[in-house]
Structure formats: structure tokens, C-alpha cells
Amino acid sequence: MVTASDFRKGVTFEKDGQPCLVVDFQHVKPGKGAAFVRTKYKNLITGAIREEAFNPSDKFPKANIETKQMQYLYNDGELYYFMDEETFDQIPLNYEQVEDAIKFLKENEVATIRFYQGAPFQVEGPNFVDLEIIDTEPGIKGDTASNVTKAATVETGAVIQVPLFINVGDKVKIDTRTSEYLSRVN
């Protein structure tokens, strides 16, 4: 059990049968009245963020979140298949479960999958990836205005904004958390 007075950033707990993660907290002791814990927490299944005040003695069950490194194998049109690298078990996931990570994930790359009570609920790819540009407008010589970008499609199908000097066939480093171009890779 976790009490509200134990809340810190990153603590997981169950509320109404749903796993939650403490995003922010503040212990408040007003001049009059009882102390309370102002908490901002995220429902790990739905992604909804709520703010609520709890009595410091409120108790919640601890949410046990299991994390596994799994290899992305392939997509059959509907499902995305991942393999546990230790047991070689394969699990199929639908697009809603993988949509944030899959746009920058190539086959055979490793992703982090989080499980709650044995069911996968979140897929997270690597923070940085190197991908090849497969489609973009050609750069125009002499067009050197600063901070001007153009749309480019990478080999996984994701569309990102890149500087004008990037051409088809170039490899680029991308921050997957923000979908931002970072640099060209040799």
C-alpha cells in the first residue's frame, strides 16, 4: 500500500482499479485546517491527467508495472508483432497500443513495452533514431534563409520537418519524443 504522504514524482498507484503515475505533487499545510497533498497524476491506461487533493493518510494499492525490452518483428496489416528477447514469446499489439512509437520503429529494433497485470498498455521506442529520407523536395542552390524547413518522409513512413539542404538518400538523426530533426548522419 502507498499512502498519499509517500507520493513523489514517478510513484505508481492504483485508483479506481486503474494504474496511475504521480506527475507532480505538493504537500500543503495551511494555517487553518488539515494538511493535504495536492497531486497531479496520469492514468497510465487512458493517458488522462487529473489534479486532485488527497488526505495524507489516504491509502492506495501499489500499481506493479512490468517493463520488458522486446524486438519489433513485423506488421501484418492489422497487428504489430513484438518478441520477448529472453523467452522468444511473441505478442501481437493493435495500432492504438503502438501508434506513438511505431512511426519511428524499424523491423528488428528494440522497444520498451510496459505491462499492467500481464496486459501491455504502452510501447516506447528509442529516444533517438537514425533513419533514411525516402521522399522530399530537392534543395535549391543558394536558398540559405535560416530556419527554413521542408517536409520529408523517412523510411518508416513518418513525415518530419528538415532543413532545405537535406535530400533523398540522406540519413538523419531524429528525436522520437518530439519528432524533431537533430542532425545529418554520415
Image (tube, rainbow, N blue to C red):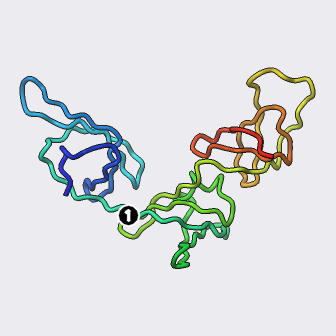
Q: Position of residue 62 (x, y in %)?
A: 26, 58
Closer to the camera in the image, 96 or 114: 114
What is the quadrant of residue 7 in the picture?
A: top left
What is the quadrant of residue 32 in the picture?
A: top left
Q: Is residue 36 above or below residue 74?
A: above
Q: Secondary structure at mark 1?
A: strand
Report crowding for label 1: few under 14, some 14 to 19, many 20 or more residues within 10 A (C-alpha).
some
Query: Seen in the image, is 60 located left or right of residue 131?
Result: left
Q: Residue furthest top?
A: 145
Query: Seen in the image, is 70 located left or right of residue 171?
Result: left
Q: Amino acid at mark 1?
A: Tyr
Q: Position of residue 132 (x, y in %)?
A: 78, 50
Query: Seen in the image, is 124 located left or right of residue 37?
Result: right
Name the residue located 57 percent from the left edge and 72 percent from the top edge.
83
Q: Position of residue 128 (x, y in %)?
A: 63, 48
Name the residue located 31 percent from the left edge and 39 percent from the top edge.
40
Q: Is residue 28 above or below residue 135?
A: above
Q: Residue furthest right?
A: 141
Name the residue located 65 percent from the left edge and 57 percent from the top edge.
105
Query: For mark 1, what is the residue?
Result: 116
Closer to the camera in the image, 62 or 121: 62
Q: Quadrant of the N terminus?
A: bottom left
Q: How many marks?
A: 1
Q: Position of residue 176 (x, y in %)?
A: 61, 46
Q: Is residue 113 above or below residue 138?
A: below
Q: Is residue 46 above or below residue 114?
A: above
